[in-house]
Each structure stands twice: as C-alpha cells, then as structure tokens.
Image: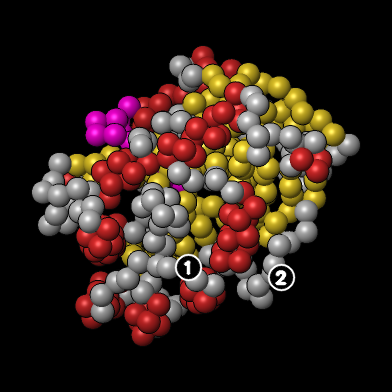
Amino acid sequence: MTQTTQHTPDATARQADPFPVKGMDAVVFAVGNAKQAAHYYSSAFGMKLVAYSGPENGSRETASYVLENGSARFVFTSVIKQSSEWGRFIEQHVAEHGDGVIDLAIEVPDARAAYEYAVAKGARSIDEPYEVKDEHGTVVLAAIATYGETRHTLVERTGYEGPYLPGFVAAQPIVPQPEHRTFQAIDHCVGNVELGKMDEWVGFYNNVMGFTNMKEFVGDDIATEYSALMSKVVADGTLKVKFPLNEPAIAKKKSQIDEYLEFYGGPGVQHIALNSNDIVQTVRDMRAAGVEFLNTPDSYYETLGEWAGETRVPVETLRELKILVDRDEDGYLLQIFTKPVQDRPTVFFEIIERHGSMGFGKGNFKALFEAIEREQEKRGNL
C-alpha cells in the first residue's frame, strides 16, 4: 500500500498555486421533487432553507431550494416544465440516474482565470465565464466537466451579498432549527468511476486543477472476503477541497462500487462527508429524525481501545451509536455512514469528527464494507 500525506502549504506556495480555490461553494442535486427534498434535509439533517428560485420570482422552468448548515450548502433543483437544454438535462438526469449530484461547485477567487487554466490543460468546457447580477452585486460563473455527468461550476462571488446567487430570493426556514447544529462544513466528496478509470481522473485533477495526491488505498487496504475497491484522494493545496475517487476491483462478488455504477447508470458522486463538532449529538438527532445509519457489530468494539486508543467519547457510547474510530500519526477521527437516502442504492452521507487526523478511516474499511455488504445482501445485490 502506498500512502502519502499532503500538508498545508505556506502563504507563498498558496500565492503560486495555478488553480487557487477558496473552498466548496455548493453541492447541487438534481431531484424529482425539490420541495420534498428540501423538507427532508431540513427535518432529517437539520439544515436551514435560506434561498429559493421558482415561478414566484421568475424561474418558469425549474424550482431550486438552497439549504445551509455552517459553510455546507446544498442546492436541490427539479423541473417544473422543461423548455431549455438545462431543463432537459435535469429531467433526463433524474430519469436515468434517480436523485443525485450534478455539480460540485467550487468557490474560486477568479473564475475567468481558473476556467482558462483548466481548459488550456484539457478540461472540457460546459459554460464559458459569464456574469450574473442583481441588487446585491455580481457573481462570475463558469463550468467544466468531470466524471460522468458531473460538473464543477467555478464560482467567483467576491463582494456578493445576496442569499445565494442572482435569481434567488431569501427564504424562511421550513421547520424550526434544531437546538444543536448537526454539522458545519463539507469535509470531502467521493466519486465512483468505472473499472480502470480511477487513475485517468486522478490525472485530470492533477493536470487540470493542480490538485495533488493526498492518500492512496489499494490491494488489501479496501477488501473483504467478497468484494474490493481501490481509492485515491486528490486535494487542493490548502486541503479545503478533497475528492476521493473510487473504482471497483476484481473480487468474488459485486462491490459497493459495482452496485452504485449499476443503479446510478454510470459514474457519479457516491457520498458526501460532513464535518461535525459533536458526532454523538449529531447521530442522536439524526436518528431521532428518521435517518438510518449502517450497523456495526458489537465485536468491532471489543478490542477497539487496544488499537484506537482513548477518544473523547467512551467506548460504550460508540458501541451504542455504532460510531467508528480510526487513529493515525496525526490524531484520530470518529465517523459513521448513513444508508442510501433514496430508494436506489446510490448516494449516502458520512458524518465525521476530526481530532488531528486528516485520514479517511483506513482502519475502519473492513468493518465498513462488511456493513455495506450486509445491506447489499438484503437488497439482493451482493
């Protein structure tokens, strides 16, 4: 197994970055019913509706709801009556893939420069840079293609003071806000690609966006008795934007990546990891709201303290809530994964609480994938 760690560069190195980023701007979902999706993520994930675009304010084709939790922003868009190429894309995407992520939007200091650099390095253009304006200011947008039908919209919103983008109006929360914030940032977004394509897309991020390889997991790192996968993680120089990329590996039975590719109809975003300051409270709140998490057998916790060491959460509580632990040379992390949040076994979420470790739970891979396999077997897809 080869593993490398990327550390945060100094200010001089950041200034020299050919593709500087400020962070994740939004994760944009195409869904069959955006109103209902907004209600689910408000109620079950504790997010706050902050902006809306629809027929009431001039958007005759689509309805979009913008939800936030700290710096994490989700946008849910559905078609009301398609009449343009964008509407046809949304409608066809939902029909072919089900509800899923279509855009991992990245905030950049200069959208035009970022776009020009990416296209010059071989990125496929979707939208050339353009401005959108309203009374709150100006936003510059551009978009490039990545794996499957996923895109990266490059967002330059310096000085913009509106609730999201021009064309959106401020909206009131759908449900009362929870007492405790469930999470406050997007940690990483994971993409699944076809067998043999992982290195191609790693190279894309290396060349087109100047991202570096942060971690690599191959061979026995991510394998059980029945299934296996390979994963590499790319990140920008500041580690604000991290994209693990998975591909299936040959094994006795169908891996979770194979299942995703089959039911999603191709490559796409598999899961989104969300940073929590208090994973115990988050899991309790989300469970109470109906979110289902993967189950971990009690045997996992019998020797946990021997190799994971002491954490801020007692083992008894970890066992009760089925939270996983991993430790590396920099510290430890706590993590748990939801089951898929739609009927198709595709998109799911991770809640992660970091204490120094910048890893991805390597010590948990076997327990995690065995838990996923148990769910696959219930669905008849193992």
153 w.r.t. 175: above or below: above
Q: Residue at x 61, y 42 (%)?
A: 78
Q: Which residue of the protein is positioned furthest toward the bottom in this rendering?
A: 316
276 w.r.t. 80: above or below: below
Left or right relative to 97: residue 37: right
The amino acid sitting under disc 1 is: Val
297 w.r.t. 259: above or below: below
Secondary structure at numbered mark 1: loop
Q: Residue at x 40, y 67 (%)?
A: 293
Label 1 environment density (alpha carbons within 10 Å; few <14, some 14–19, many ≥20): some
Residues in magenta, as a range: 189-200
Q: How is the image coloured?
A: secondary structure
Residue 250 sits in which quadrant?
top left
Left or right relative to 253: residue 60: right
Give 91 or 216, whichever is nearer the viewer.
Answer: 91
Q: Could you tell me residue 295's position as x and y percent?
A: 32, 71
Give 322 or 18, whichever is nearer the viewer.
Answer: 322
Secondary structure at numbered mark 2: loop
Q: Residue at x 36, y 74 (%)?
A: 322
Q: Could you tell me residue 30's position as x and y percent?
A: 55, 41
Res 176 label = 2
Q: Is residue 194 magenta?
A: yes
Res 291 label = 1
